[in-house]
Every structure is written in structure tokens, then in C-alpha cells.
Amino acid sequence: MSVVYLYGFVPADAELPERGLLGVGDAPVELLPLDGFAAAIGRPDSAVYSAAPLEARTGDMEWMAEQGLRHEQVVAWFVDHSTIVPSRLLTLFSSDDALRDAVATSTEIRSDLERFTGTREWDLKIVWDPAVFAGHLAQVSDEVAELDRQIAEASPGKRFLLERKRKDIARTEGRVVARRLAVELLDDLREDSDESVLLPPPPDNAPVVLNAALLVRTQREPAVLARAAAARDRLGEIGLTVAFTGPWAPYRFTERSDG
């Protein structure tokens, strides 16, 4: 017996590759027609992909990683060739009818398919190196630039006190300035994006100063990538590492629980 594994929802006219597409559990991917759209599904063996056996394997990280890879390979195909409202890993239904019933009254799927048409998600993460950044802080902080001028002109005794003050400012204000520069870059990329979302901040002691996602139209991707590349070079020189990765399915812009 098999279960219905859901990868996501796609336009009604979506197609599969001529040679087929294998997904989780080596089950062929199918398109299940629904009301005005379709579901990208597979039918893996229920002896492995049902509640009890899955619960027993949740601690097997290698196995779970393999399932995630197979899931993403299917989702990525639709990202590159169509549009998809992606489902979470290991979203399962007992039958086609159970899936149909779960989405029978949903208007969000149709609206999301319209919203995501011609777009893909790109993720922005900016990490700072406090030691390197402190050495370049005068380039991006007027206060520190003025302090450096005073240090250069000060007598040895006063210079010692001013240098201690600079270290204190770098320690307390460095992250604030790094965050400001990161937000400025995000605002710049937003100009060529449809939507953006700030992701939950990391712990206070984490080196990540900004984590965000942008929904970008495919025809605007070259412009956004060029902006990100220029910022990566410019900010990298002062201790900020810019990672701009994608394209991905719009997971960050899908808030539903997928049935």
C-alpha cells in the first residue's frame, strides 16, 4: 500500500519532465488535478512513510537529511520550470480524497500561485567579524573617525585613554553599525524585489546581524544579483560577509500549515 506525499501545489497546466521525476521513497512524481490547480504528489510505501514508522526514524538524522534532499529536488524542478506553493517536508495524506478534502475550501492556494508566478525566493544573510570590523569602523562611523583623528594628534598619555575609549565604542557600537549597514543593503535590494521578510534574529552573541528573504521576479534577478555582488565586495573589505543564496521555492512567504 502507499500514501500520498505532497510536495506542493502547482498551476493546472504544469507539466513533468518527459523522463519523469523521482522523489521521496523513489516514488514517481505525479500531478493530481484539483479545482483550478494541481498537487505535485508521490506515492511512497506506507510501510515506511506513515505515522508510526516515521516517528521511529525522526532521530535518524542521516535518513531525514536524505528525505529533505529528495523533497527539495522535486520542489526545485518546479521552481525552475513552473510555479510551486511548496509544502513542508513529510506532508502526507492517506488518499487522494483526503488531500482533496483538505484543500477543497482553500482560496489561499490559488492566490499564492498567482502571487508567486514568475518569482523565486532569494535569501540574504550578513555576518560580521567584530575584530576586522573594529579596524575599519572609522570608515562607517563619524564618531569613531573623529576619535581616530584625536588619537593621532594626542599626547602619549591622552592617546592611551582615547584608545581605551575607542575599544569600548567598538565593542558596544560595532554591532549596531554593522546592523545599520546590513539594513541599508536590504533596503537597496528591496527596490528590485516584490516582497521581503525579516527572519527571526539569532541570539545576541551570534555573528549574524541580518537574516532575510526576498521574493524576486526572474527578470529582475540579474539586477538584484549585481547589487548583492557589489555589496559583497564592498562590505567584505570591512568585515561583513554577505551571503545571497537561491533561487528557492518561496517557503518564507508561505504561512499556511499545508493541511
Image (spheres, rainbow, N blue to C red):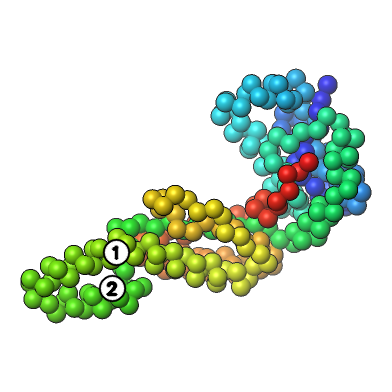
User: In this rendering, does residue 28 appear at all?
Assistant: no
Amino acid under disc 2: Val
Establish if 7 lies above or below 79. Answer: above
Please state if 12 lies on the left or on the right of 9 as rendered.
right
The numbered dot on residue 170 is 1
Q: Secondary structure at mark 1?
A: helix
Please state if 163 lies on the left or on the right of 187 as rendered.
left
Please state if 170 lies on the left or on the right of 89 as rendered.
left
| Depth order, front residue of 56/239 | 56
Q: Mark 1 to mark 2: distance in Å?
A: 8 Å
* Residue for point 61% across, 60% down: 197
* Residue for point 81% across, 58% down: 111
Q: Residues within 10 Å of mark 2 (few under 14, many from 20)?
A: many
Q: Disc 2 marks which residue? A: 144
Q: Mark 1 and 2 residues: CB-CB less than 8 Å, in contact?
A: yes
Q: Quadrant of the N terminus?
A: top right
* Residue for point 86% across, 31% down: 95
Q: Secondary structure at mark 2?
A: helix
Establish if 117 lies above or below 49. Answer: below
